[in-house]
């Protein structure tokens, strides 16, 4: 299986080219990550039109602020996801209420027969890592990561103490990180 | 190891997800600048968070969004060869522009209705709307201020920027307050030669506007303002390039009581009374 580390270097090269104002590199980056980010934005915002608008904003931000990107900061994917989440949280805050329910429903990854086999396998591994989390961790992850709630809002929504949200969040990420590392998906 | 180090396991998760940490940001950032183990922890959470969307059902990236992005990029770079034949639909945000054009009659009607209400109404509706709008604006301002801080903090953490100066903020002797206000400040320099001044304060009046200044005893330059939270805490981030920061530092150096080359004077004052609340030196 091709591991993301190989892709990571390609991603870095794309960003270097974007920093040199290469429009084709931006198109290539969109083709590579547009779908992933769109899935995240759709999940967080629940509205196709809004998700498209934010997606556009994310890639224009990458184009305009590419000079601040530094390959030592981490992977391009993590940077893009952080930008997309921040933008989506902006929108959720404006609406004052998340549109997605506090359930962690993971649809099948078999919906796209044209998906490259390697990418599908990697996504399935990530999905498996998330699915293997106990419910109490997944619901905190859902509330904070996908619904954009603060830790206090999540504590109210889930009716658990504030400190429990923090500890479950930490444990969820520890388990996720361990599982991804064991599968060779992160360093 | 310090208390901050022990607590960072939970705080790193919060930071990497853009949430407000529970410990003073200056001490947290200061610790991170020196502790590779904790920086690695933050990077680990950041990378894991970056993989989570892969667990969702895959989506096709919309081709029309791709077209709109590239259209905008070509406009910005002056490459009009592939730009559309109708530039009026290609404003800064093409999707919004199209939507506005489509809804213009509705927008005009709404504007006319608002004007009629404003002119002929008994005023209460206008006043009520104004109050709601002000309240919303205040919330937005506070949120944007916090968001700015969080994003800067996240950036600094991941980039491993180094802390160049730190200092404690105390009530000034000439203007003794009730003694509750305390704060910390830290200055970070990024690999791209940008400077970020981070301030975190507690013991303030709640829901009040405070300004942050940098400079000497007589000459102070306001660099920004923030609104305290209902619990009386506040935070602020000021970002500047090397030239702007050098100018501000020079402002400090020229004062008689001043700071040496390695010291920077700064403070916080209440906007309503213009009274200094906190001052300090970073070194």
Image (cartoon, rainbow, N blue to C red):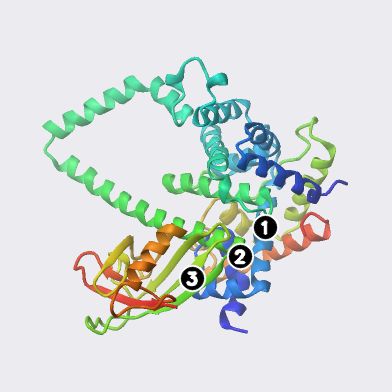
* Alpha-carbon span between mark 1 and mark 3: 23 Å
Image vertical order of residue B159 relative to residue A23, above or below: below
Count of numbered tags: 3
Badge 1: residue crowd in 10 Å (few <14, some 14–19, many ≥20): few
* Res. A46 visible in picture: no
Identify which residue, A170 or B189, lies in the foreground. B189
Chain to which mark 3 belongs:
B
Q: Position of residue B279 (x, y in %)?
A: 32, 76
Relative to A25, B120 lies left or right: left
**In the depicted view, which residue is nearer to us: A107 or B10?**
B10
Q: Chain of mark 2?
A: B
Whether B44 is drawn above or below B102: the answer is: below
Q: Is residue A70 left or right of residue A91?
A: right
| Residue contact between numbered discs 1 and 2, judged by CB atoms under 8 Å | yes
Q: Which residue is mark 1?
A: A72
Q: Which mark is residue B273?
A: none
Residue B206: % across, % down:
30, 68
| Helix, strand or loop under label 2 | loop
Per the rendering, the mark at residue B160 is: 2
| Residue closer to the observer: A187 or B156 | B156
Q: Is there one chain holding both mark 3 and mark 2?
A: yes
Q: Please state, as top left, top right, bottom left or bottom right, where the C terminus of chain A lies in the image.
A: bottom right
């Amino acid at each position: 299986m091709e591991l993301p580390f190989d892709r990571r270097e390609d991603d870095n090269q794309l960003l270097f080219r974007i920093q040199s104002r290469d429009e084709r590199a931006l198109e290539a980056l969109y083709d590579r990550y547009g779908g992933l980010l769109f899935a995240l934005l759709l999940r967080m915002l629940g509205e196709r039109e809004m998700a498209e608008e934010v997606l556009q904003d994310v890639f224009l931000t990458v184009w305009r602020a590419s000079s601040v990107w530094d390959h030592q900061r981490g992977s391009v994917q993590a940077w893009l996801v952080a930008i997309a989440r921040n933008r989506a949280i902006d929108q959720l805050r404006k609406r004052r209420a998340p549109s997605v329910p506090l359930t962690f429903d993971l649809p099948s990854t078999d919906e796209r027969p044209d998906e490259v086999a390697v990418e599908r396998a990697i996504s399935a591994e990530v999905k498996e890592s998330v699915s293997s989390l106990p419910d109490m961790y997944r619901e905190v992850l859902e509330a904070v990561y996908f619904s954009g709630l603060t830790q206090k809002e999540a504590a109210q929504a889930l009716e658990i103490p504030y400190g429990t949200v923090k500890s479950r969040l930490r444990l969820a990420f520890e388990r996720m990180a361990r599982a991804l590392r064991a599968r060779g998906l992160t360093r | 190891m310090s208390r901050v180090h022990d607590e960072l396991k939970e705080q790193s998760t919060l930071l990497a997800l853009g949430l407000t940490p529970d410990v003073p940001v200056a001490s947290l950032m200061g610790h991170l600048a020196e502790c590779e183990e904790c920086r690695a922890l933050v990077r680990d959470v950041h990378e894991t968070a970056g993989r989570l969307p892969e667990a969702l059902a895959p989506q096709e990236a919309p081709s029309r969004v791709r077209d709109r992005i590239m259209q905008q990029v070509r406009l910005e770079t002056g490459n009009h060869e592939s730009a559309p034949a109708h530039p009026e639909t290609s404003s800064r945000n093409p999707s919004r522009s199209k939507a506005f054009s489509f809804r213009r009659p509705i927008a005009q009607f709404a504007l006319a209705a608002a004007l009629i209400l404003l002119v002929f109404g008994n005023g209460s509706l206008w006043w009520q709307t104004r109050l709601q709008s002000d309240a919303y604006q205040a919330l937005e301002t506070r949120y944007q201020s916090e968001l700015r801080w969080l994003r800067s903090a996240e950036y600094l953490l991941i980039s491993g920027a180094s802390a160049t100066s730190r200092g404690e903020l105390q009530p000034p002797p000439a203007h003794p307050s009730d003694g509750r206000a305390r704060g910390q400040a830290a200055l970070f320099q990024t690999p791209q030669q940008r400077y970020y001044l981070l301030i975190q304060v507690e013991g303030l009046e709640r829901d009040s506007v405070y300004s942050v200044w940098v400079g000497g005893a007589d000459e102070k330059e306001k660099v920004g303002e923030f609104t305290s939270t209902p619990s009386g805490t506040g935070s602020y981030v000021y970002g500047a390039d090397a030239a702007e920061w050098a100018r501000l530092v020079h402002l400090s150096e020229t004062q008689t009581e001043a700071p040496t080359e390695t010291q920077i004077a700064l403070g916080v004052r209440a906007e309503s009374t213009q009274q200094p609340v906190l001052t300090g030196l970073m070194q």
